[in-house]
Image (tube, rainbow, N blue to C red):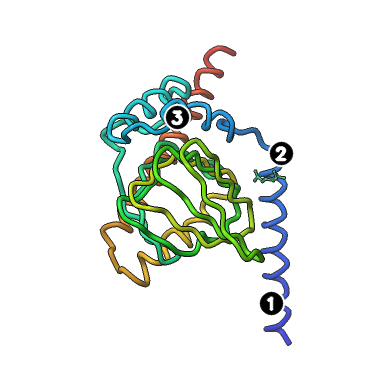
Amino acid sequence: MAFFRACAKWIFIIIFIIFCIQYWLEHKSYLFSDEAVNKIAKKYIGQDPETSFPKIIKDFRRQYPGHILPDEEMQWIFMNAGGWMGAMCILHASITEYVLLFGTAVDTVGHSGRYWANISDTILTGSFRQWQEGTLQSTVFEPGDIVYHPIGEAASVSWSHDTWMVEYGRGFIPSTLTFALADTFFSTTDFVTLFYILRVYAKAMALEAGFYISEIRQQMKDAL
Ligand SMILES: *[C@@H]1O[C@H](CO)[C@@H](O)[C@H](O)[C@H]1NC(C)=O
């Protein structure tokens, strides 16, 4: 009896925390938006990613000073999830947002993941096929298109080789890590990649924390 009471208590606490986070997500202000990320990305549609990605990073740095990782901390990291394999380069990440470059040099297909986040992708090169749950056909997205992956939804995703894009995610980002890391942890057991992913996320969070601490310090100085 005491066991069930303890369980009920924890279930109640967890549901309460989820509601609090959801309320916070719906009422907080955000640094980026789908439109703002797309506006930068779409200038480089169809261009060779080797040359366009450095320019995209520069544009983001100009528009969001202090929120984009420095070059020496940026890194292309393999990502295995849902059966597919791609690579990502994180520009910005916090508890509620991320901006990253994503793509694959080979054909790959798998499960999109079901996230507690809204995700949008601007396709720069290649093609992205999305088969949404409950439908009997897929949609192909081409360079210049935006692909939306709404919160709580799942799809089958397939990228042709040399597909590259800019991705923006908004939601409870730590929850997306379970999917992002699952294949690395249980399938590839590539713990070097696991370490890289956790390290770059930690660095991005530290950058954000540093930004807000210096802002608060500045405000206190101004107030005195
Ligand atoms: C996700 O998108 C939906 C539909 O546009 C919106 O109602 C919801 O608030 C968004 N959630 C987050 C965390 O941005």
The CA span between labels 3 and 1 is 42 Å
Placement of the N terminus among the 4 image quadrants: bottom right
Residue under pointer 1: 6
In the picture shown, does residue 19 fall above or below 203? below
- Image point (72%, 47%), residue name: 23
Residue 134: where, in percent of width, then height? 66, 66
In the image, which disc is placed on residue 67? 3
- Image point (63%, 58%), residue name: 153
Identity of the amino acid at label 2? His
* Camera-side mark, 1 or 2: 2
Residue under pointer 2: 27
Identity of the amino acid at label 3? His
Residue 98: where, in percent of width, then height? 49, 41
In the picture shown, does residue 102 fall above or below 55? below
Element under label 1?
A: helix
Identity of the amino acid at label 1? Ala
- On the picture, is 50 further left or further right than 216? left
Residue 67: where, in percent of width, then height? 45, 29
